[in-house]
Image (cartoon, rainbow, N blue to C red):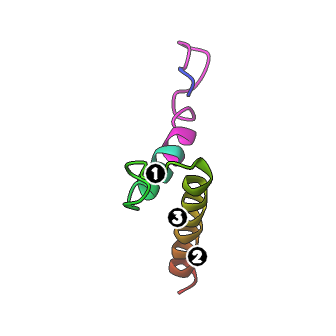
Amino acid sequence: VRIARKGIESSERLGRRRWVIERTMSWLTGYRRLSPRYERDPRNYLAFLGLAAAICCYKRLVRLTT
């Protein structure tokens, strides 16, 4: 996240990436297993994180195509 310098950069463009990241994190925290980290093994946590991301993408694709 960058902060616009006065008179040099437009502040309209700076918040776009942040919104995408915050929205993605809010989608992923909707999965109960990911909110508190139950898994001791990081490989299991990353597997569930990938699964949650795939489910989010699938739901979005289904919504866009129907």
Task: Between label 3 and label 2, give the one nearer the viewer.
Answer: 3
Q: Which mark is residue 38?
A: none
Pointer 3 or 2: first along the chain: 3
Give the magenta-colored segment's residue range: 4-20
Q: Which residue is mark 1?
A: 23
Q: Position of residue 9 (x, y in %)?
A: 60, 21
Label 1 crowd bin: few (<14), some (14–19), many (20+), radius 10 Å = few
Q: Residue furthest front?
A: 40
Residue kind at label 3, given as amino acid type:
Ala
Label 2 crowd bin: few (<14), some (14–19), many (20+), radius 10 Å = few
Residue kind at label 1, given as amino acid type:
Arg
Q: Position of residue 40 (x, y in %)?
A: 50, 48
Looking at the picture, tell me which residue is in the foreground, 24 or 66.
24
- Residue drawn at 40 percent across, 54 percent down: 29
Q: Which residue is mark 2?
A: 61
**Structural distance between the alpha carbons of marks 3 and 2:** 14 Å
Q: Quadrant of the N terminus?
A: top right
Cβ atoms at labels 1 and 3 below 8 Å apart: no
